[in-house]
Image (tube, rainbow, N blue to C red):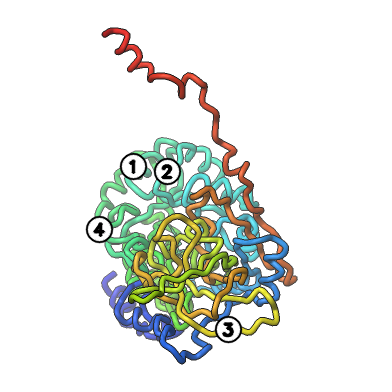
């Protein structure tokens, strides 16, 4: 095994990122901060430093707003399809399954589009399993890796859903529910890597997966319940470093060596995607090539030809989605003193895109003027804030610093203008603080290969926000609590 690790380590990684600029999308490093567009606040700035939308033309954006209102998520079928094709070309020696980590964007239309390309499903909860089935996936196309093993795991296994036990207790639960079943085992390989601490899910600080040194306990549980471990699984984080990811590939093969019935090695997802201009994206062909070589070396040595599974979430959807919002206010705290800012307030916020508030994540932001003929306007530095009553509801924080304001170069936004927040296809609609301040869940639109925007989730109504609230009986809100009344009567 050591030979395999060494072989992987020798592979040059310089080409693993497609672009070489701007490391650390959300790392908050001094370099990243200097590279951020804060410089645009200085006078005489070039107009090109304000970004333009990745795929939404001004005409299409106006049409989407006119038909469906804002805020609205817009997904692009052509971009989703292109990413699916790239993922399906991941280098693999003995077969490949690409599973979409559906938590990144669970809308049925997106699931169905990816299913059409032959992409299968990585579900992160029992509910996601059911949701994928409702979207048309066969149970055997779905694998579950969850922090919480659903209580109906026996029924799911019976249907043909694959499961990766992510803790010893989960393995025990699977064994009790389905003795003799085929099972996957998710390990924590001892190292992790993520774009931020919150998205790193490997190493000693992470509770994800079975610690790699607990193989004896794993083997004991397999034997106790006559379970057959046919798959080993690792996923070390989102936005992971390709070098660490490759190292984990070899560590995972070492775990597969310990479990002779393993036929499939699942290396998870986490492929870093550049959202901001100049940020690099992982080149799958480059990271995959040495992994394929390692699988071949493993086969030469052991005679076992392992199938590869990968689980991209971000990679498939991040840049194929945008949030379209409306500028609903422009204010300023620039007075005689220092430290003021010009603020742009959108009709959207952490209720649609939580990532900046949660991670200090950076998303490209562009202004499109409401009137087609309006000039682009002078570029200035602005803070873009959301509509929630939270000072942390910000679109323009410093990289990795959710509470630190960082001005963004924008074309003089005016009330009523359109604002496009790009890179919003992954972990936005699925992860928002929906209904905070009682704002309804935003609509979702998918621009088809026909170029037409189709509504794929309607905006919530207030009635839907309140649908599950129940009235209290009058006694529960009138007079004293029963205990206090009894105590008063005793005195
Ligand atoms: C979230 C997750 C993924 C996808 O991560 P991305 O960073 O979106 O690619 C893959 N596998 C598992 C088990 C996950 O939890």
Query: Which residue position holds label 3?
Result: 377
Q: CA distance from mark 1 to mark 4?
A: 18 Å
Check the picture and name the quadrant holding the C terminus. top left
Task: Identify the residue under disc 4.
Answer: 204
Which disc number belongs to residue 169?
1
Q: Out of 129 and 221, give the one closest to the viewer.
A: 129
Please name which of the two marks, 2 or 3, marks the residue nearer to the observer: 3
CB contact under 8 Å: marks 1 and 2: yes
- What crowding class fits label 3: few (fewer than 14 Cα within 10 Å), some (14-19), or many (20 or more)? some
Residue indicated by mark 2: 149
Specify which label sits upstream in the sequence, 1 or 4.
Answer: 1
Nearer to us: label 1 or label 3: 3
Task: Identify the residue at image location x=62%, y=65%.
Answer: 74
Dot placed on the residue nearer the N-terminal end, 1 or 3: 1
- Seen in the picture, residue 212 relative to 417 is either above or below; the reply is above
Q: CA distance from mark 1 to mark 2?
A: 9 Å
Q: Which is nearer the N-term, disc 2 or disc 3?
A: 2
Marks 2 and 3, how far apart at CA? 53 Å
Viewer-nearest residue: 137 or 30: 30
Location of residue 477 in the rendering, given as x and y in whole percent from the top left corner: 46, 24
**From this viewpoint, is residue 122 visible?**
no
């Amino acid at each position: 095994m050591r030979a395999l690790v060494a072989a992987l380590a020798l592979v040059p990684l310089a080409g693993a990122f497609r672009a070489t600029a701007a490391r650390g999308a959300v790392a908050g490093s001094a370099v990243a901060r200097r590279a951020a567009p804060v410089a645009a606040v200085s006078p005489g700035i070039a107009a090109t430093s304000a970004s333009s939308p990745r795929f939404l033309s001004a005409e299409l954006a106006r049409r989407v707003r006119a038909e469906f209102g804002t805020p609205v998520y817009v997904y692009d079928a052509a971009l989703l399809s292109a990413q699916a094709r790239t993922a399906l070309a991941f280098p693999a020696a003995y077969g490949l399954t690409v599973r979409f980590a559906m938590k990144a964007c669970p809308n049925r239309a997106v699931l169905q589009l990816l299913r059409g390309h032959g992409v299968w499903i990585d579900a992160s909860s029992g509910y996601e399993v059911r949701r994928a089935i409702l979207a048309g996936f066969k149970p055997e196309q779905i694998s579950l890796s969850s922090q919480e093993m659903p209580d109906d795991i026996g029924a799911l296994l019976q249907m043909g859903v694959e499961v990766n036990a992510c803790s010893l207790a989960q393995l025990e639960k699977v064994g009790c529910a389905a003795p003799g079943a085929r099972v996957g085992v998710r390990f924590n390989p001892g190292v992790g890597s993520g774009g931020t601490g919150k998205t790193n899910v490997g190493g000693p600080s992470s509770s994800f997966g079975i610690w790699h040194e607990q193989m004896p306990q794993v083997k004991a549980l397999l034997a106790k319940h006559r379970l057959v471990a046919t798959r080993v699984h690792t996923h070390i984080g989102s936005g992971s470093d390709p070098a660490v990811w490759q190292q984990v590939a070899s560590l995972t093969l070492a775990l597969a060596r310990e479990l002779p019935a393993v036929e499939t090695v699942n290396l998870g997802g986490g492929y870093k995607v550049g959202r901001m201009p100049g940020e690099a994206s992982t080149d799958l062909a480059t990271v995959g090539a040495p992994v394929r070589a390692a699988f071949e070396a493993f086969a030469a040595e052991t005679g076992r030809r392992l199938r590869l599974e990968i689980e991209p979430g971000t990679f498939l959807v991040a840049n194929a989605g945008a949030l379209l919002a409306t500028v609903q206010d422009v204010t300023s705290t620039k007075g005689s003193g220092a430290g003021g800012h010009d603020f742009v307030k959108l009709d959207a916020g952490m209720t649609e895109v939580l990532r900046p508030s949660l991670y200090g994540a950076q998303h490209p932001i562009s202004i499109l003027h409401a009137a087609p003929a309006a000039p682009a306007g002078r570029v200035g530095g602005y803070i873009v804030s959301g509509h929630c009553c939270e000072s942390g509801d910000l679109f323009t924080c410093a990289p990795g610093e959710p509470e630190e304001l960082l001005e963004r170069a924008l074309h003089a936004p005016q009330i009523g203008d359109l604002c496009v927040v790009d890179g919003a296809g992954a972990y936005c609609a699925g992860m928002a603080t929906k209904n905070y301040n009682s704002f309804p869940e935003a609509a979702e639109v998918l621009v088809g290969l026909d170029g037409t925007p189709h509504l794929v989730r309607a905006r919530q109504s207030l009635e839907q926000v309140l649908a599950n609230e129940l009235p209290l009986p009058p006694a529960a809100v009138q007079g004293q609590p029963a205990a206090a009344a009894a105590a008063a009567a005793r005195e």
